[in-house]
Image (spheres, rainbow, N blue to C red):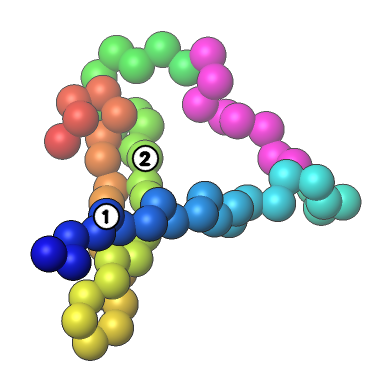
């Protein structure tokens, strides 16, 4: 019948943590969130579509998760 499974993709390493560049401290570590608009988190990623790639950006308030 020609039924076959898809091969698992290899894990792609996208971060190089072994570098000589300055590493900045995590300013949010130990921060107590008591209200909104105190800490915002952001992420950007790309999504493959038929004609290429599109980018998705998300910005979220860490307290309210909105």
Q: Tell which residue pokes out farthest to the bottom in this image.
A: 51
- For residue 4, side relative to residue 66 (left or right): right
Mark 2 or 1, nearer chain start:
1
Residue 60, quarter of picture: top left
Q: Which residue sits at x=70%, y=40%?
A: 24
- What whole-number distance in Å separates the C-alpha atoms at marks 2 and 1? 38 Å
Q: How many marks?
A: 2
Please provide percent x and percent y for residue 53: 30, 77
Q: Which residues are magenta?
A: 23-30
Name the foreground residue: 38 vs 56: 56
Q: Residue 1 appears in which quarter of the rendering?
A: bottom left
Q: Please tell me whether mark 1 sits on a helix, a strand or a loop.
A: loop
In the rendered image, residue 52, in percent from the top left (x then y), is placed at 29, 83
Image quarter of the C terminus? top left
- Relative to 61, is 16 above or below? below
Which element type, helix, strand or loop, lies under badge 2? strand
Indicate which disc residue 29 carries.
none
The residue tagged 1 is: 5
Residue occupying the far right of the picture = 20
For the residue carrying disc 2, how many other residues have a C-alpha within 10 Å: few (<14), some (14-19), or many (20+)? few
């Amino acid at each position: 019948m020609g039924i076959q499974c898809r091969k698992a993709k290899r894990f792609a390493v996208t971060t190089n943590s072994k570098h000589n560049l300055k590493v900045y401290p995590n300013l949010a570590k130990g921060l107590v969130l008591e209200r909104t608009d105190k800490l915002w988190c952001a992420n950007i990623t790309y999504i493959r579509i038929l004609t290429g790639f599109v980018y998705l950006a998300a910005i979220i308030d860490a307290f309210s998760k909105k």
